[in-house]
Every structure is written in C-alpha cells, then in structure tokens.
Image (cartoon, rainbow, N blue to C red):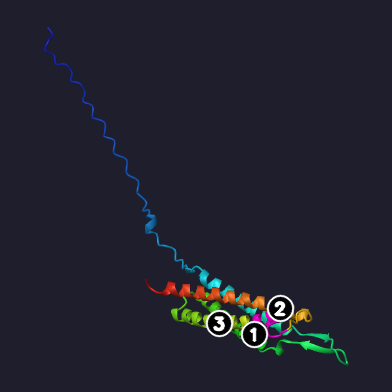
Amino acid sequence: MASTDTLAPEPEKTAPPPEASAPAEPEKAEVLAPEALPPESKVTVATPPPDYLVVADLVLRVLLFASAVAAVVVMVTSKQTKLIPLPFPPFGSTRPAKFTHSPAFIYFVAALSVAGLYSILTTAVSFLALLKPGCSTKLLAHFVISDVLILGIVASATGAAGGVAYIGLEGNSHVGWMKICNVYDKFCRHLGASIVVSLFASIVLVLLVVLSAYSLSKKIPQ
C-alpha cells in the first residue's frame, strides 16, 4: 500500500527580478549665469547737456554786434546835400548835412563802434565757454562789470544823439533853433533809424547784464 505520507513537491523558488537600476543622471553642462559672463568693454563718454544760459548769452552778443554795426553804418551814411535859398545873391547855396557836424553824433558813432568791438571779443569768449562747459565765477563777474560799462556808454550816446535829433525834428522856439528835418528829410530818416537800432542794442545789453548776474548767482553756494 502506497504511503500517504508522500511529500508534496516544493514549489520552485523564483529569483526576484533584479531591481531596475536608477537611470544615470545626465551630466549637467556648466552654464554660467548672465552676471558671471565677462562684461563687454564699452567705453562711453558722457556728453554733458548744453548750458542754455551760455547759448542765450552767445545769441545776445551776436545780436549786439549786428545792431551796433547797423547803427554805425546807418549814421555814417546819413549825408545829404540840399540847395538852401538865400535872400541875397546868389539866392541859393548848397549845404551838406553830415553826422560830423554834431559832437553828439560823433560820440554816438564812437560809442557804438566800441560796443561792436566789445561784442566781437565777448562773443569769442562766450563761444569758448560753450565748448568747455562750467564757466568760472571770475569770468561771469567780468562779464557783469564790462556789460554794465558798455551799457552806460551806449545808453548815454543814444540819449545824446536822440536829443539833438529831436531838436532837428521839432526845433526850439524858445532859443530860436529852427528845425531842419523839413529840409534834410533823408538825413533825419537815417538819424532816426540809427537811434532806434541803438536803442535795441541798449535793450540787448540790459538782457546781457541780467543774464550774467543770474548765471553768477547760480554759482554762489547757498
């Protein structure tokens, strides 16, 4: 009789599957941060903004030169010759009218000529100050003093020439000075135009004095 105690076959032991090896991490490429990159060598020269006060000063000095030259040219070319009737023979005489016949007009031409020469020199200095910003306080102080001096000369010459021209236009019955502009009309028109241009030059000089004083005040530490 067969034995019932036959051993059951043991189940075959299966080897556990090999663990999947973790994938190898890819090699990280070394990436430099943007700030780690060497900066490009760029040399930038900072251009300072133009000083608008210096530009205005330069423009005003050019206007001063133009007005001074125009006033002198108009005054010098004011010669006129007229035939003046006389009550006795030869009953007529040609007489010229020139600016050299009045000391006031001679002073006017001399003063405006000085102003024109002064404007040339100061225009050159102002142009150099525009090329090299940062005017010194001493230069501005010299501008203020010299502008006031030239303003006084031009204003006095304009007033003297204007007074004589007014007498030529209206006369003075109290002292027996007769008007001449009814005879020398062209001469008087030249005088009037020259005096008006000189008055414009005086206004330009006033603006220059104010501008130079304002620029000087900005240089003074508060």
Going from N to C along the chain, the mark reached first, 2 or 1, is: 1
Q: Which residues are magenta?
A: 160-177
| Residue 33 - label | none
Going from N to C along the chain, the mark reached first, 1 or 3, is: 1
* Of marks 2 and 1, the one in the foreground: 2
**Residue underneath mark 1:** 108
Measured as percent of width and height from the top left, residue 49 is found at: 50, 67
Looking at the image, residue 125 sits to the left or right of residue 166; the answer is left
Residue under the point 68% across and 85% down:
175
Q: In the image, is residue 139 above or below residue 20?
A: below
User: Is 32 in the magenta?
Assistant: no
Looking at the image, residue 114 sits to the left or right of residue 171; the answer is left
Q: Residues within 10 Å of mark 2 (few under 14, many from 20)?
A: some
Q: So how many labels did they put on this image?
A: 3
Indicate the quadrant containing the C terminus: top left, top right, bottom left or bottom right: bottom left
- In space, the residues marked 1 and 3 are separated at their CA atoms by 12 Å
**What amino acid is found at the position of numbered circle 3 in the picture?**
Gly
View extreme (right): residue: 90
Q: Residues within 10 Å of mark 3 (few under 14, many from 20)?
A: some
Residue under the point 59% across and 77% down:
202
**What amino acid is found at the position of numbered circle 1 in the picture?**
Phe
| Residue 152 - label | 3
**Residue underneath mark 2:** 170
